[in-house]
Amino acid sequence: MAVDYRQLEELRDACARHGVAYLVIGKSGALLHGFPDTTQDADLFIRKTLDNGRALVRALRELQFRLSDQEAKEIEQGKDFVQLKNGPFDIDLVYAPDGIERFEDAWTRGIDVDGIAVCSLDDIIASKQAANRVKDRETLPRLIAFRDYLRQHQGQRKRLGALPANRP
């Protein structure tokens, strides 16, 4: 089942209530830029701090994700990749995406789409190029052409503000 926009809004709202610093990345991020495709899950690039991980666990539980103690621990400690299929939609949590050095740098390049923090298309493309998976290699030419089209036909997009502060 594909993740839908309403679910991303719910995720945005829960993350905001708990002060989670995240960026939507991958194909779900590209979709929020307007890329015409579908995806089965939400991909989130998570700022790797203990407080942010704890805030994310609270937000996910609020959204009815059934996290095991082990999954909660991996999220809190910032395991590089955590895949969840035990909630209202599938989600991949990425703390160290290929092709992107630091969360804080990606944040400065990210954009705001209806209050949802989204990685820049350049970062999404860099991550897919670095991952070098077959499915990414198939999508990349269209994604690059889409980015180039946007550069030619759209003005500056709304940038993100300050990083959120985690809330207990």
Image (cartoon, rainbow, N blue to C red):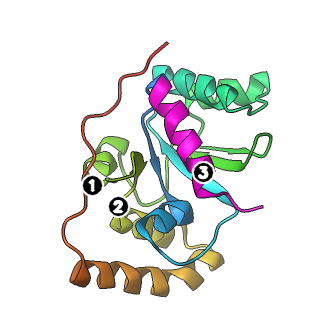
Q: Marks 1 and 2, Cα distance to the nearest angstrom?
A: 6 Å
Q: Secondary structure at mark 1?
A: helix
Identify the residue at horizontal 48%, vertical 25% (top origin): 17
In-image side of 159 versus 127 (left or right): left
Q: Marks 1 and 3, Cα distance to the nearest angstrom?
A: 25 Å
Question: Which of labels 1 and 3 is toward the front?
Answer: 3
Q: Which residue in the protein does label 1 denote?
A: 109
The part of the image, by quadrant, that contains residue 2 is bottom right
Read off the magenta span: 1-17
- Residue 16 in percent (x, y) is at 45, 31
- Residue 9 in percent (x, y) is at 54, 46
Nearer the observer, 75 or 146: 146
Identify the amino acid type marked 3: Arg
Question: Which of labels 2 and 3 is toward the front?
Answer: 3
Magenta span includes 2:
yes
Count of all numbered marks drawn on residues in the image? 3
Q: Which residue in the protein does label 2 denote?
A: 120
Q: Secondary structure at mark 2?
A: loop
In-image side of 85 versus 128 (left or right): right
C-beta proximity under 8 Å, tags 1 and 2: yes
Indicate which disc, 1 or 3, sits on the residue closer to the N terminus. Answer: 3
Q: Which residue in the protein does label 3 denote?
A: 6
- Residue 19 in percent (x, y) is at 43, 26
Indicate which disc, 1 or 2, sits on the residue closer to the N terminus. Answer: 1
Q: Is residue 112 above or below residue 140?
A: above
